[in-house]
Amino acid sequence: MNQEGQTGTRSHMPLHALWEQEKGGILPEQVSEVFQKIRQKKYLIHMLPNGVSAALCGDGLSALGARPLMAVAPEEMEEIVPQVDGCVVNLGQLNQEKIRAARLAMECAATKEKPLVVDPVGCGASIFRLQAVQELMKIPWKGIIKGNRSEIYSIQQGKLTKEGIDSFKKHRLTDQLRPGSVYFITGEPDCILWEGGGVVISHESPIQQNIVGSGCLAGAVTGACSSAVYEIHGVDGEWMKLAAASASLGMAFVLEYARRKKGYGEVKTALLDGLCLLSETCFLDWLKVKANSSMKGV
């Protein structure tokens, strides 16, 4: 995939196609409804956390109006997951105990038909991480894989990138998708891939600080969106595409909101403040402007 939205041999829709109803697009009101639903219903989201980013993700879910739960013990997973509205498995800071917890959480989410988001943090950094993620991907679960280009490349190719948790190179992705999964590929631009199509969502200028955990935060937001869309639209699988698009657009708004700040602490706080606004009319107005400008080819 390049900046024009190419992945392998498949062409993906530009942003304007996301809004075109005759092509199965969605309305800005539908995206706004997702975040209003999160605040109204206060979904309980279980996130198997990464210790580096757990606090930011918990704060982010709370800022959206959701309720975070971050159990880590493998012994709890089969008891906790059935109680929650959605599940996010963040695979950062992997060890054998966390792999066991992730497996149990993913298997339980699949059995209980809970919305599931998997974030393969830094899976191309080491053989241990890559092999663990490859084994977890064999579990028969359906949901969203949220990762940057480097991480998705490692999943598709089975190769190390040794970029840590970052994505610096323009890795060329393929059309290969894991069955039952929608890919939410973060970066500049974001790209959402599903069986038979995809959409590219561009961002404004990046924020002025590289905030540790911001990628994990996007995964947490995706988990909350998944719970809302799952309740609104049922279990037919379409919820994954809308949930990923809603999370991408929500984070695009938040990053644009935080872009005006300069200091590290200011930017980090602005990310949380921006999340609070996603259920407000200002976000819907922003979506409408973005939809209108993209339809005009701006």
Image: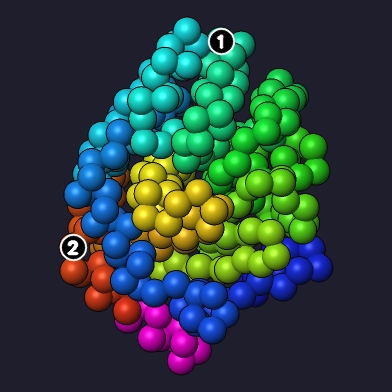
Q: Write down the residue under mark 1.
A: 97
Give residue 198's quadrant in the image. bottom right
Rendered position, 94 above or below 263: above
Q: Write down the residue under mark 2.
A: 280
The secondary structure type at the circle numbered 1 is: helix
Q: Residue furthest top?
A: 75
Rendered position, 86 above or below 146: above
Residue at the spot 41% in from the left edge and 36% down from the top edge: 86
Residue at the spot 23% in from the left edge and 45% down from the top edge: 41
Q: Is residue 297 magenta?
A: yes
Distance Cα–Cα, label 2 vs label 1: 40 Å
Q: Is residue 154 magenta?
A: no
Residue at the spot 46% in from the left edge and 78% down from the top edge: 19
Q: Is residue 21 left or right of residue 127?
A: left
Residue at the spot 50% in from the left edge and 49% down from the top edge: 235
Residue 24 visible in the displayed image: yes
Rendered position, 26 above or below 231: below
Residue range in magenta is 289-298
